[in-house]
Image (tube, rainbow, N blue to C red):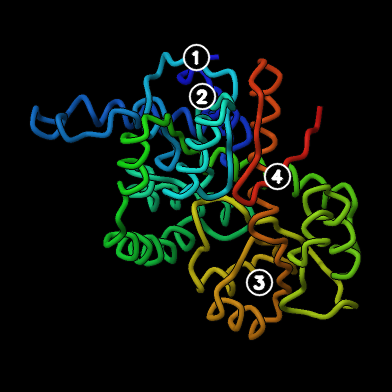
């Protein structure tokens, strides 16, 4: 496959698993195109053209020619300069490495990371939170994340990729969409009664089972083993953790338990205050699940996958 085809396939798989629905995401793209056409020449020059066909700002080809043929790639949850140097050393040692894929975003994907958070409003709305409330409590959190990422050295890894001539791609939200879809379906089909049952159900998923052996498996952070789950919401996409204020609104909407990748101390205390159960499934394992769904499709197209940097590889085909 060509690098462009891998990138486009990742976007397509992300849209198909998007909690907003593919039709809704396509409407967002249409709206973006219409807004672009109204821009003046100066604004168009600075516009991120990827937004016309890609609804996920944190997913893109960071370095490399789109028509590069990719037969073998190496991929991990995080890719830093050291990881690129490892990939380059493997290549120098005679191991074919055509592409490095990072789950977490790099470059412009990191700069525009906060833009994908707006989907969280639709996720809250689907759980019963009024859309006006969801959008209202989300904006401050989006602004906070944008401020937090501003000082980052966003292009350090890309500069290294360029100097090493190592093609680099990142795919974040498409993978997160897929882990949320897979885990929510698995939990719904099992219908666990207590939090202890829920943890056991999560460990039926191979990546979580392996993570448990590594000491990083699912954990109950709010609630007790014997506490009943109630309505379970899996929240694993939308960029990063949402606003603290969503805890109270989710409880009002009837949610009893939230399964997440990670949670801040501040938000955890808010959950305990409102008696919302929190089960942390695990960050690396959850990211691995979403990545694996997409990597399986790459592999079906004949691309060899080499996992590294925290990725727990499990094949589902």
Asked whether residue 75 appears in the rendered view, the answer is yes
Q: Secondary structure at mark 4?
A: helix
Image quarter of residue 298: top right
Label 1, label 2: how far apart the Cα atoms are: 8 Å
* 256 displayed left or right of 283: right
Q: Secondary structure at mark 3?
A: helix
Residue 308, position as x, y percentages in the image: 62, 44
Mark closer to the chain start, 1 or 3: 1
Residue 129, position as x, y percentages in the image: 57, 60
**Label 3, on which residue?**
251
Q: Callout 3: few (<14), some (14-19), or many (20+) C-alpha neighbours within 10 Å?
A: many
Q: Which mark is residue 98?
A: 2
Image quarter of residue 160: top left
Mark closer to the chain start, 4 or 3: 3
Label 2, label 3: how far apart the Cα atoms are: 48 Å
Label 1, label 4: how far apart the Cα atoms are: 26 Å
Mark closer to the chain start, 1 or 2: 1
Q: Which mark is residue 69?
A: 1
Q: What residue is drawn where x is 69% and y is 56%?
A: 234
Q: Name the residue at the front extreme.
A: 93
Q: Nearer the viewer, mark 4 or mark 2?
A: 2
* 24 displayed left or right of 112: right
For the residues bearing labels 1 and 2, Cβ distance under 8 angstroms? yes
Q: Secondary structure at mark 2?
A: loop
Q: Which mark is residue 289?
A: 4
Mark closer to the chain start, 2 or 3: 2
Q: Callout 2: few (<14), some (14-19), or many (20+) C-alpha neighbours within 10 Å?
A: many
Q: What residue is drawn where x is 63% and y is 78%?
A: 271
- Reply above or below: 204 against 23: below
């Amino acid at each position: 496959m060509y690098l462009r085809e891998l990138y486009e396939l990742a976007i397509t798989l992300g849209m198909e698993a998007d909690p907003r629905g593919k039709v809704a995401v396509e409407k967002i793209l249409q709206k973006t195109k219409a807004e672009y056409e109204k821009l003046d020449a100066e604004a168009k020059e600075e516009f991120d053209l990827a937004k016309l066909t890609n609804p996920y700002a944190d997913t893109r080809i960071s370095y490399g020619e789109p028509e590069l043929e990719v037969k073998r790639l190496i991929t991990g949850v995080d890719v830093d300069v050291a990881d690129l140097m490892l990939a380059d050393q493997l290549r120098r040692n005679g191991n074919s490495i055509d592409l490095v894929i990072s789950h977490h975003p790099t470059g412009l994907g990191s700069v525009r990371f906060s833009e994908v958070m707006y989907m969280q409003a639709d996720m809250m709305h689907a759980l019963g939170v009024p859309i006006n409330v969801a959008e209202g409590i989300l904006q401050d959190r989006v602004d906070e994340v944008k401020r937090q990422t501003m000082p980052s050295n966003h292009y350090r890894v890309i500069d290294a990729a360029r100097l090493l001539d190592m093609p680099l791609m990142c795919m974040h939200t498409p993978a997160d969409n897929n882990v949320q879809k897979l885990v929510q379906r698995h939990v719904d089909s099992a219908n666990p009664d207590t939090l202890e049952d829920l943890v056991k159900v999560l460990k039926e998923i191979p990546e979580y089972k392996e993570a448990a052996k590594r000491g990083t498996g699912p954990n109950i952070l709010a609630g007790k083993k014997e506490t009943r789950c109630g309505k379970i919401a899996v929240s694993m996409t939308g960029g990063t953790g949402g606003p603290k204020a969503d805890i109270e609104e989710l409880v009002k909407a009837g949610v009893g338990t939230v399964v997440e990748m990670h949670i801040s101390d501040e938000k955890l205390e808010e959950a305990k205050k409102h008696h919302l159960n929190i089960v942390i499934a695990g960050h690396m394992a959850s990211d691995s699940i979403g990545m694996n769904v997409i990597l399986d499709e790459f592999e079906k197209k004949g691309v060899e996958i080499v996992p590294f940097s925290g990725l727990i590889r499990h094949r589902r085909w």
